[in-house]
Amino acid sequence: MQEFQSREPARQQGQEMVGVAYFASQVVSLLAERNLRSPVEPRPSLVKSLIKASLSGSKDQFAELLADMRRARVSVAALADIYIPLAARTMGENWEEDEMSWVEVTLGVSRLQSLLREIGSAWAADQAGDTGHGTVLLIIPDREQHTLGPMVAMNQLRRFGVSVCLRIAPTTEELRALMAQRAFDGVLISIATREKLESVSRTVAFLKKHSASPLPVIVGGAVLTTMDEVATCTGADLSTNDIGEALGSIGLKFDSQCVLKRA
C-alpha cells in the first residue's frame, strides 16, 4: 500500500481550490487515454492557459482549460509528465525575470502540485494490492524546496504498476525501521541542488549498509542538469531522470502495457 509522509502544510481548503478539485475530477475520464510512448511537443498556448488557471484557481478557468486540452487531444500522461512541470518551470522563470511575484509563483505551483496529487490517484498501483511490478522507496532529502519533480516521478512509477513508498526528509532511525519492515527492489533519491550531495551520499551508504540484500540506489533530480558524475559523488549505482532507465537498472520491467487506471 502506498505510503505518503509529508511535512508540508495541510492541503488548502475553500473557494480557491474549487477549480483544482473540479479539473482533477474530470481530467482522467475526459482527456484522451493514451500512454506517453513518443515525444510530445507541448503547445505554448496550453501551457499559458494552465498557468492562468493555476493562478486564478477558478472553476471557470479550469473548465476552459479542460475544453482546450480535449480539443488538442492532450493525454493525461502528457498533462502530468510534460505540461504541469513545464508550467511550474515557466512560472519560476517569470519570477526570475520579475514578470511574476513570489507569492504568485508559490500559489500557482502549489495548485499544480495539488492537481498532480489528485490526478495521480487514477494510477492506482498502490490501491490494487500486489501488482507484481515491484516496490521502490522514493526519498526527498531534508530541506528540499522542490517536490513537484519527485511527484511527477512517483506518478510515472505508479502508472507502470510499481508500488511507491515515499519518504520526505526521513531520519536514519526511520530508514532503519523501514528497511527492517519492507523489502524494496530499489531506492530512488531526488536531488535538486549540489548542496545536498554530501548528505545524500551518507544516506546512500546507510541504505546499502543496512539492506539485507544488494539494493540498487538511483539518484536523479534537477542537479543532473547542472553537473555530471552525480552517481560517483553520492555512491549511487546510477544517476538518471529517465524512469524507464531507472526501472531497468533496478531489474524491473519497463512495460507500457501494464499501466493501471481506475475504471
Image (tube, rainbow, N blue to C red):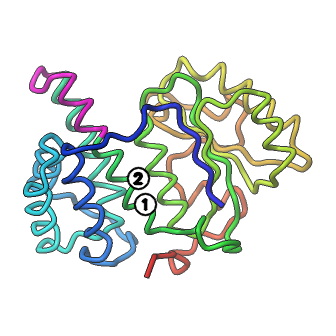
Amino acid bearing label 1: Gly
Magenta stretch: residue 106 in it?
yes
Give the residue at x 16% y 67%.
69
Where 12 falls versus 232 (above or below)? below
Where 72 falls versus 90 (above or below)? below
Q: Main secondary structure of the magenta part?
A: helix
Quarter of the rendering occupied by the N terminus:
bottom right
Amino acid bearing label 2: Arg
Check if mark 2's residue and mark 1's residue have beta carbons within 8 Å.
Answer: yes
Residue 51 in the image: state x and y as whole percent.
16, 45
Residue 2 in the image: state x and y as whole percent.
62, 57
Q: Name the residue tied to disc 1.
A: 120
Give the residue at x 38% y 69%.
36
Specify start and end residues of the magenta stretch as a single range: 97-110
Magenta stretch: residue 104 in it?
yes
Q: Name the residue tied to disc 2.
A: 117
